[in-house]
Image: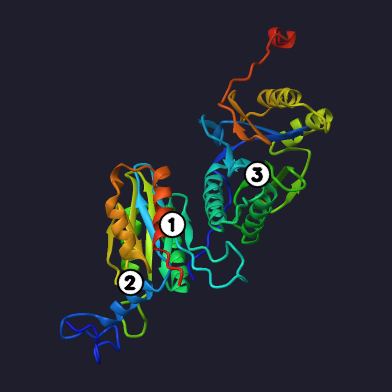
Amino acid sequence: MTSIGTGYDLSATTYSPEGRLFQVEYAAKAIDNSGTAVAIRCTDGVVIGVEKLVGSKMLVAGSNKRIYHADRHVGTAVTGLLADGRMLVNQTRSECRSYRSYYGHDIPARILNERMSMYMQKNTLYGAARPYGCGLIIAAYDIDGPQLYAVEPSGLSYSYYGTAMGKGRQQAKSELELLKLQSMNTAQAVKEVARIIHLVHDDV
Amino acid sequence: MLPVKHTTEPTVTGTSVIGIKYKDGILIAADTLGSYGSLAKFRSLQRLRKIGNYTLVAASGEYSDFQYILEVLDELLIDDQQQADGKELQPREIHQYLSRIMYQRRSKVDPLWNQILVAGVGDKDDRIFLGQCDLYGSAFEGDTLATGYGAYIAQPLLRKAFRPDLTEDEARKVLIDCMRVLLYRDARTINKIQIGRVSKAGVEISDPFKLDTYWTNPLFVNPS
């Protein structure tokens, strides 16, 4: 199967003869250029680590964080086009706020995931708007315990025990598969996440 | 445009809230009654609430408007946390924010029918803060403050007792004595109060407790 969609890749509203939406697939490529994000769901919480690629010594340390609060019980991280990512974080915060206002309760993790997935999927329906060029990692602790979701530009999302996005994701995912994720606690996971990010970091 | 309605009178109300600064912080007191007119309907209302790690708010007036205010402050605190700057909103800032909301509603002739005390020990200059804001949009600070009947009955007693080096025990005694006088004289009180404290250690709200009352005065024993 060719991955060059000549002619069929000009608009998100055009399928290729194999039934692929190339614009959505290209959006996913945008994530691959960004620093790796690794996340682990543990017995007592979720740990997210992000490889911040510092472009220059002139940049102030601690600016342009990639991990955000979205609510008291929700954290998110973005990979890919970070400006798009900020819009997604704002939308995540808005969903959390409106759920709390309507229902007087923390938004359940799976509902937040559903909303963000549908939100990202919307941008794959129209020629006038492009898909978001980012992956969103959602970490939440609700009444069912800690949960980890990752959403792709297509709007596809899964619940994970461990996942990675960005440059070093292949290697990071292999490392995660070696770990006993379901019996790990956050104290241990922080060390593993840090180790994996160091490992996959490419000094180029 | 849809017809606009305005608040004309409160329904479930809390009576006085009183507060006094002492050497290391502030003590606030209020009873736990929500009056339905002259009916003592809700006898276990929490009128003192912790906001964040540094601030205490306490309200008189319409309890449902206070509940709305608590929702607004909750959202404010979540937004503050999302700045992720390692700083939390100071009591003075919460007082300012509330005052703005109260004045805005007053200007629409649809007030939040409350008088609110805001107390806190922040981490900047002017560490010990005690302020009040009300349904008219008035906002001010003081060493001793009181709402409702407390403004007439308790405030003179609080002012007489206040000293900058007041200890917590002395302040507590003054507050309890004031609440006792209010229990005797305000017909919309009950004998169940809470005391809230803000200090460097943070915010602490006591469980409700009973006030002792004294009826041995001959005028009560042999009324004539």
The kind of residue tagged 3 is: Ile
Q: Is residue A105 visible?
A: no
Gap in Å between the C-alphas at discs 3 and 2? Answer: 48 Å
Q: Earlier in the sequence, mark 1 or mark 2?
A: 1
The spot of residue B31 in percent (x, y) is 60, 30
| Residue located beneath label 3 in the image | B116
Q: Which mark is residue A49?
A: 1
Q: Amino acid at mark 2?
A: Pro
The answer to whether mark 3 and mark 2 are in CB contact below 8 A is no
Question: Considering only vertical position in the picture, is B137 above or below B158?
Answer: below
Give the mark toward the camera: 3 or 1.
1
Q: A112 or A180: nearer the eye?
A: A180
Q: Residues within 10 Å of mark 2 (few under 14, many from 20)?
A: many
Work out how far the residue at label 3 is from the one at label 1, CA to CA, in angstroms.
43 Å
Identify the subunit bearing mark 2: A
In which quarter of the view is residue B115 placed?
top right
